[in-house]
């Protein structure tokens, strides 16, 4: 059924970089839906013409989901597209009730509005720069806000993985990198978020198989810092 539905929409091709939290959201969503897809790995230092032509507005950012010959850009847009284009396939990411959908969209937007900016200040600033400490403080504040929203629930969606979980969990493999460059511990500052991230991976094989190892992310970032002349 999933394959038939995907075929009717056109072949699905994901343009992604293996460490991208945004691209890995799409990996999780496609697997959750049980949709067959091809993934093409992108070198962000030498982007393919396919990527550049598929997302010219944002200069060839990943991810892009090609549906036949039609590109769908921006990870949260792609997640909603997958839900809407394949409604009878797999589990829905967004809840059915309008208020619950709006609530989930709000928190996914919060993640994208707040977390990447402070994360970049932590790992892409020169060692000892004030931006690192400022980024760390802002990141901890963001994670504490998310921790308050999680409350005592196993997942942001309740008892099972949902839209906000899929939006946030691909940042978990980056926690080690943030900790090493920022000089702090996510588990110490936000224990419920650390436990939630571990639960997402341990209880959901589709998450575990969609995310890179934290050490891989750290080594990737170290190579980027050298290329930027920071180390």
Image (spheres, rainbow, N blue to C red):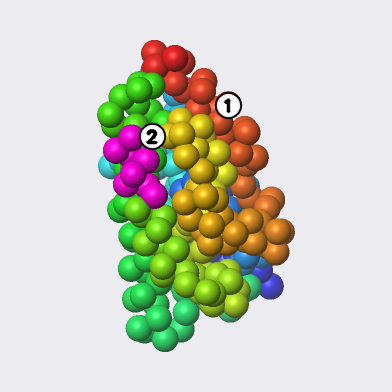
* Residue hosting label 2: 122
Q: Position of residue 21 (x, y in %)?
A: 49, 46
Residue at 48% across, 55% down: 190
* Residue hosting label 1: 219
Which of these two is toward me, 26 or 19?
Answer: 19
Q: Which label's residue is closer to the chain start, 2 or 1?
A: 2
Which of these two is toward me, 86 or 208?
Answer: 208
| Farthest-out residue, front | 188
Is residue 51 shown in magenta?
no
| Farthest-out residue, bottom | 97
Residue at 47% across, 39% down: 184
Q: Quadrant of residue 101?
A: bottom left
Is residue 136 shown in magenta?
yes
How dense is the environment of label 1, judged by Cα within 10 Å: few (below 14), some, or many (20 and up)?
few
Left or right: 168, with 101 as reference point: right
Q: CA distance from mark 2 to mark 1?
A: 15 Å
Callout 2 secondary element: helix
Q: Position of residue 81 (x, y in %)?
A: 44, 65
Q: Looking at the figure, which quarter contains the C terminus?
A: top left
Secondary structure predominantly adopted by residues drawn in magenta: helix
Residue at 37% across, 66% down: 107
For the record, the magenta segment spans 133-140
Q: Position of residue 10 (x, y in %)?
A: 55, 58
Q: Looking at the figure, which quarter contains the N terminus?
A: bottom right
Q: Nearer the viewer, mark 2 or mark 1?
A: 2
Residue 184 seen from this side: yes
Q: Position of residue 160 (x, y in %)?
A: 60, 74
């Amino acid at each position: 059924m999933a394959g038939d539905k995907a075929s009717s929409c056109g072949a699905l091709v994901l343009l992604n970089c293996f460490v991208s939290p945004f691209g890995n959201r799409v990996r999780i969503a496609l697997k959750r839906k049980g949709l067959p897809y091809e993934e093409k790995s992108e070198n962000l230092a030498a982007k393919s013409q396919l990527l550049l032509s598929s997302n010219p507005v944002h200069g060839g950012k990943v991810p892009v989901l090609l549906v036949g010959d039609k590109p769908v850009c921006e990870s949260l847009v792609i997640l909603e597209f997958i839900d809407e284009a394949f409604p009878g396939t797999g589990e829905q990411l967004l809840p059915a009730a309008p208020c619950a959908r709006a609530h989930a969209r709000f928190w996914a937007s919060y993640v994208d509005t707040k977390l990447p900016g402070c994360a970049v200040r932590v790992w892409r600033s020169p060692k000892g720069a004030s931006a690192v400490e400022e980024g760390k403080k802002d990141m901890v504040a963001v994670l504490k806000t998310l921790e308050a929203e999680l409350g005592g629930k196993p997942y942001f969606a309740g008892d099972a993985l949902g839209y906000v979980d899929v939006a946030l969990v691909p940042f978990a493999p980056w926690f080690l990198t943030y900790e090493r460059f920022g000089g702090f511990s996510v588990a110490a500052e936000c224990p419920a978020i650390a436990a939630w991230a571990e639960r997402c991976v341990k209880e959901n094989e589709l998450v575990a198989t969609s995310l890179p190892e934290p050490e891989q992310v750290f080594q990737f970032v170290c190579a980027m810092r050298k290329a930027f002349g920071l180390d």
